[in-house]
Image: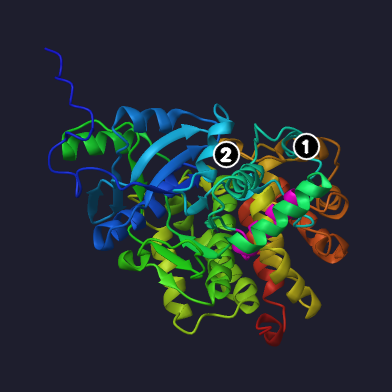
Amino acid sequence: MATPRLPQLNAETPGILRRIVAPAPGIVHLGFGNFHRAHQAVYTDAAVAAQGGDWGIIGISSRSSAITDAMHAQDMLYTVVEISPEGSKFSTPRVHTDAFVAAQEPQRVVAAIGAETTRIVSLTVTENGYTYSPATGSLNVDDPDVQHDLANSPVPRTPIAQIVRGLQRRAQTHGKAVTVLSCDNLADNGHHTQRLVHEFASLLPAGEAAETVQWIDANVTFPSSMVDRIVPATTDHYRSLVAEQLGYEDQIPVPAEPFTMWILEDNFIAGRPAWEAAGAIFTDDVAAYEQLKVRLLNGTHSLIAYLGALSGAATIPDATGIDYIEAAARRVLRDEYLPSITVPAAVDVEAYEEQLFSRWRNSALGHRTSQVGSDGSVKLRQRIPIPALEMLDAGAMPHYLALTVASYLSCIAPLRGFDPGNHANEMQDPARETLQELAAGSGSGRDLAAKVLGERHLLGDELATRDDFIRRTGELIDIIHRQGPLAAANAAAESASLLPAQTRSIR
């Protein structure tokens, strides 16, 4: 006898909803992926429950219709599965009012951003979604999509162009102010987004450009924020868990760790939800929290992912459980990232470090090394140059930062004859093809590092001039290829141990 099919999650599913209908829309969110649904949506759901308000969210996916189709089939509902070794907790946010795909309906994106009811436009489009040059930080005007968007105003492809065209729609119709809120891992993400929006607008025809920039300056704010929650990809495991525990089918449950943090600058020109009711922190010192996260968490996380993938570890907990990887991670965090930041007064940095490793050991979550290691060509540009340059200027070699870059290149662009393994091969990266072409024409790690860092400026203009760092990165690539990642980590440890004590604590 066939097993009876469980009912699909929908608005009629009993016992799951804290409100009958979603609030009226007030937020348009670009980048409708798992992170948004486990982070901003959860905070907004709690804010509306606490203090109300028309803060429903219109979710816009970039290209894929998988989530938007499932959301419509499930009455705009999904399950957040909070995963820990102690067990699972489940919740069902009720804040999304609509969802669609930008690539299929670009004019609808402009209309949604331009709508009078929209008071916040938020983004989780990943670093790569901002179409900027990692080397300069400016808008990448050579990008084909940017060129398309400058020439085809009704059908923008990139988030920056979508925002500008939506803001123009507002200026030409009702003229109401709006906030653009970046929630991506970009240094000073509010001002970074503001600069890219200005750069795009300034490239429009002269009269149009001046009018658009003037209106934006007077009517749009760009607060900075820092977001933090580990959110793995959805798999059949989580679908089965929801079915077994809750008795319904959900095609798009979102797994997430228990920990969550949101730090924001309170600069919302058209109002905002009461996110503090869910634990969000509003502060004038977002930058300090951002540095803490981007370097200590994200930077260290990258090293764990790349060394883990090269060592055959499928998940971050597996990688963190390898002694030499944990040791390398602690060294890069303490000795090379930490000296480059100013720790917020409210943060106990030793407790923060232990909390990070506890999160990374969450075996129930199983965050994959291939997911964490993806898009390194953009991510590492945010994490490595400043701490590396500070150490180099102080006369010290950042061996573990060089190891991070060497491990990344070994995963994404291995030299001929070296197989980095399945987990490295699964990593996605916009520069993979270019880097692999450079690797194919390189006879050694030193040669590859010189081409990638020195000639192509992968980590920016300043680090491209530091021959000693480039040479050290190349040496570690060669060690990885000839002897393996353990040998490279040991080489970094041996060299770092020779540094004078004062060079290990720059600030």
* Left/right of residue 350 with respect to residue 51 in the rendered view: right
Q: Is residue 107 visible?
A: yes
* Left/right of residue 347 with respect to residue 478 in the rendered view: left
Q: Which residue lies under the disc numbered 2?
A: 110
Which residue type carries mark 1?
Gln
Task: Give the quadrant of residue 294.
Answer: bottom right
- Secondary structure, mark 1, is helix
**What's the magenta region?**
186-201
Q: Which labelled disc corresponds to residue 219?
A: none
Q: Is residue 106 a member of the stretch shown in magenta? A: no
Tell me residue 438's x, y (percent): 82, 39
Residue at the (50%, 41%) spot, across then down: 112
Tell me residue 32's x, y (percent): 47, 41
Tell me residue 351's x, y (percent): 42, 77
- Secondary structure, mark 2, is helix
Task: Give the quadrant of residue 422.
Answer: top right
Residue 368, compared with residue 106, is above or below; it is below
Q: Which residue lies under the disc numbered 1?
A: 147
Q: Using the image as rendered, state which of residue 266 and residue 183 is in the foreground.
A: 266
Residue at the (51%, 52%) spot, across then down: 122
Residue at the (37%, 64%) spot, across then down: 275
